[in-house]
Amino acid sequence: MSTYWGLLRGHTVRSPRRRTLSLGPFALSVRGSALVAVMGIITAVLLVGVAIFILGHSEGDVVEYAVDDSRAFYIAEGGLERARAYLTALEEADPNANPIGQIIEGSVPGGGSYSVEIAEDANPYGWLDAYEVVSTGEKDGVLRQVKATVIAETFAIYQWFIGSTGGGFSWFRTGERFEGPVHLNGNIDVDGDPWFGGIVRAGGHANILQGSNPTFERGYEEFVEKVDLPSRSELLSTLRAKSEEVGGKRFERIGPQGAYWKVELQGDHLSAAPYDKFDDPIPGGLVVNYDFAGTNGVIWFDDDIELQGVLDGEITIGVDGDVHIVGDVTYADSTPGNGPGPNCDDVLGVIAGGSSRGNIIIDRTDDNMNDCELHGVFMALQNTIEAEDYQHYQPRGDLILYGGLMAQSAIHIADYNNGGVLKSGYYRNYHYDSRVMTLPPPFFPFASNFSLATWEEVVPVVVS
C-alpha cells in the first residue's frame, strides 16, 4: 500500500527496515540469574520438604516414645497386681512360706513385659505378712518402675460383715453411720437414710425401699464374688494352734457340761474363773491370772466365756463355743463414748468359733441395760451376733462400737416397728477403727487379699 500511494505522488516510498535488537552478553546474564533463582527456589522447597519430613518423623518418634512410656508404666502397675495375686494364693496355700527373692515375669497382649521381685520383708518383727515389691514394666525398650509395700488383709478390716447369702436380716436405717467397709454375701437392704463412708459390697442386689435416700460416699457394688469366713477347722489349725505354742495360752475344757469361764480384762492381764451351768463357782476350780507381757497375744478357751473389762495390750481371744458380753469391753487408752485415743496401741479380737453354737451375745445384764460400749473386732464364725431378748423390753440405749462386727448368719441388735422406729434393743452407734489395717488383732484370720500400704515410682529405674 505504501508503494502504491508513493507512485501516485511521483516518488518512491521504501518500506521500513526491520531491526533486531541484540542484547549480547547482558541477555546471557539475565538468563543465568533466572536459572539460579529457580534453582534456589527449588532447593528451598526441597529443604523445607526435608525439614517437614524430618520434623514429622521426629514428632512420630516423640509420640511413639510417649505411648511406649505410658504403656510401660501401666505394665509395671499390672505387675504389682500380679504380685498381689501370687502372694494371696501363697498365703492361702502355705501361710508359713517365704517368698522373699521370688521373681515373677510375664508378657502382656500388644507387646511388653513385666518383671516383679518380692524384694524384702516389710514387717520382719511382726506376725502380719507384709512385703516390699518392685515391679518393672518394659515396652519397646522403654522402662518404668514402681515400688509398693503390700500387707495381708485380715477380716478385721470390715466394720460390718454377714456371710449368709440369705441377707441375714441386715437392714440399714435412718440415722445409722458406717465409716468402714461393709460386706454382705446377700442383698443390701435399705429402709431410710443411712450413711456409708466406706465401700459397700454385696453378693446380691441393692434393695432400697421407696422413699429411702441412703448416702454411699464411695458407692456400692452388687453381685460381687462371695467372701467366706474361715472354717472352724481352719480356726483350730491356726488360732488354736498359736495358743498352744510358747507364748500362747489355751484354757482346756473344764469338764462339767455347761461349764464356762468368767473372763475379766484387767489392763495388762486377764482373770478367768470357772463356773458351772448353775452360775456357781466350780469347787476346786482355780482362778487364772494371765499376764499379756511377752506373749504372742493369742488366748483360746475350749468352753463358753463371759467377757467384760478394760484391755491394755494386743490380744485375740478364740472360743470353741459362745461369747457372752456381760459389760463394757474397752481399751485402756480410750475415753468413754469417744473410743481409742490418738496414740492408742490397744487392739482386741474376739472370735466365737463353736461348731454347734459360735454366737456372740450381748447379755441383758444390769450393766448392759443403759448403753453398751465395745472396742475391738468381734466375729461369730458359725452363727449370729445378737443382743439377748432384743425383741423384748424397752430400748437399752446405744450399742457404741469402735471396731467391727462379723457374723455368718445375721446381726440382731434391735427390733423396729413398721414405721422403722426402734421399739426394743439398741440404737446403732458405730465407728470404724482404721488402725486395724496395719494393727489387726494378733493372728486374726486372713481375708484372701493383699492391700497396698505404700506406693511410689522409682526414678531413675534401678535395674539389677
Image (cartoon, rainbow, N blue to C red):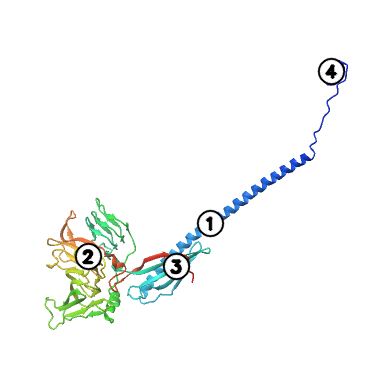
Q: Which residue is mark 3?
A: 135
Q: Residue furthest bottom?
A: 284
Which residue is painted at 60% across and 54% down in the image? 54
Q: Amino acid at mark 4?
A: Trp
For the residues marked 1 and 4, what is the alpha-carbon distance in whole angstroms?
86 Å
- Does any portion of residue 412 appear in the rendered image? no
Left or right: residue 45 compared with residue 455: right
Q: Nearer the viewer, mark 3 or mark 1?
A: 1
> Is residue 346 positioned above or below 392 on the image?
below
For the residues marked 1 and 2, what is the alpha-carbon distance in whole angstroms?
56 Å
* Front-most of residues 381 and 20: 20
Q: Horizontal and vertical percent for residue 306?
A: 17, 73
* Front-most of residues 349 and 29: 29
Binning the other alpha carbons within 10 Å of mark 1 as few (below 14), some (14 to 19) or many (20 upward) gives: few
Q: Horizontal and vertical percent for residue 289?
A: 19, 79
Mark 1 or mark 2, which has the lower sequence index? 1
Numbered tag placed on residue 339 in the rendering: 2
Q: Nearer the viewer, mark 2 or mark 3?
A: 2
Under circle 2, the secondary element is strand
For the residues marked 2 and 3, what is the alpha-carbon distance in whole angstroms?
39 Å
Residue 83 falls in image quadrant:
bottom left
Under circle 3, the secondary element is strand
Binning the other alpha carbons within 10 Å of mark 4 as few (below 14), some (14 to 19) or many (20 upward) gives: few
> Is residue 95 positioned above or below 158 on the image?
below
Left or right: residue 72 compared with residue 373: right
* Front-most of residues 132 and 398: 132
Under circle 4, the secondary element is helix
Mark 4 or mark 3, which has the lower sequence index? 4
Q: Which residue is mark 1?
A: 62
Q: Which residue is mark 4?
A: 5
Binning the other alpha carbons within 10 Å of mark 2 as few (below 14), some (14 to 19) or many (20 upward) gives: many
